[in-house]
Image (tube, rainbow, N blue to C red):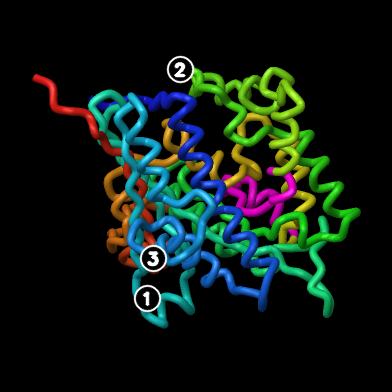
Amino acid sequence: MPRKFAVIGSYEADILWRFLDGVSSAVAMRMRDGSPPGEENLTFLLCELLDANSTSLHALDYPLSQVRTDLESSDAGITLDVEFQTHEHSKWIESNYSGADLGIVLAVNHPVLGQSHRGILVQAKRLFSKGKKREFSLFSQYSSFDKAQADFLKALEQRFGAWNSAFYLWYNPPSTAFTDAEAKVLRAYEASGPNPFRSWRRMDPFLDEMLERGYPALFGTHSSRATSADEEAKHRQWRMTQPALRISELDVAQRIGEHGPPQLKALYDARLESRNEVSFSPFADFLLLLLMSSRYGSDNADWVRLAEGHRIKIPTPKNSNERTVLDELETAPIPHHSMKLTIGSTLPPVG
């Protein structure tokens, strides 16, 4: 039986959040240490860290194997499986049309939480440092941002009728890669904005309606702040690892990148000003929100298959006079990588 959203208890949510946030921090550290990695390398690393078949190649503080063990001790009876694929592209497609870097499919197959498949497309960009010292600042830019690329994704989203289903993934180093003064400002942004997911004790059953209204209880009011010195110490430690991996809705990226490459500060400001948008959300927060709310991602069968890496014919426009760059293509460009996160069940069959 399908569900509009999946309500997951705080214990299970904390387990999933801890794993996903650990992956985010591991990718961010790669930007701080060693030679500057390209966006393709960072995306491949992200997929490897999440994938059940390759994550053991890397050292994570909270590995997927431990996640599964901890979930087994839960009464909710859920499991987590993650797998990814890399897709080959023709040189002609790569040089003429830029599809998404990553397709993500969230699958739920659980007797209590329901059954669903939703997909999103993600374009990844990294923050660029400047100068011989490779210094980052609040005014550093995502220099490879291409407005035409964002417009192409928007046209694709509209043609498939897949609303809130295309996003930008921003790769950032931890605050320790910034000067002390810049790092202090970064932590102030984090302390003033929405808290990480671990402070949400349980997703409200009216989540979708609350998101539509921009209800502040979900996003950084005092009711969700740390209530003890120990909690604040944990939050402070987390802020030092940020901004790490962040997600923005396509509309936010288009708005901020209208007149040039987006700056880190502009995205932080958008996060403070927005209540009901995914403007600059931590990676782990967003994936759990994607899992729990039907507001994000599309269950359109063709869109899901596109996110999985299948070649899908581009739908004909509803208005015959509508002409876009999509009309030059027979099939939509597939993402370079696909990742599937499946919430399964350990519960026995009933009936």
Q: Quadrant of the C terminus?
A: top left
Q: Is residue 245 magenta?
A: yes
Which picture quadrant has residue 282?
A: top right
Sequence-earlier tag: 1 or 3: 1
Are the residues at dot 2 and dot 3 in contact (C-beta closer than 8 Å)?
Answer: no
Q: Which disc number belongs to residue 333? A: 3
Relative horizontal placement of residue 283, taking residue 64 as reference (left or right): right
Mark 1 vs mark 3: in front? 1
Q: Nearer the viewer, residue 186 or 80?
A: 80
Tell me if residue 11 is in the magenta stretch. no
Q: Give the vertical position of 196 relative to 95 (above or below).
A: above
The residue positioned 27% from the left and 23% from the top of the image is 112
Q: Residue furthest left?
A: 351
Q: Which residue is mark 2?
A: 205
Disc 2 marks which amino acid? Pro
User: Residue 89's mark?
Assistant: 1
Looking at the image, residue 313 lies above or below residue 119: below
Residues marked 1 and 3 touching at CB (< 8 Å): yes
- Cα gap from disc 2 to disc 3, whole angstroms: 37 Å
> Residue 153 at what x, y percent from top left?
49, 56
Magenta stretch bounds: 238-259
Label 2 crowd (10 A; few <14 / some 14-19 / many >=20): few
Element class at badge 3? loop
Residue at position x 60%, y 47% from top? 248
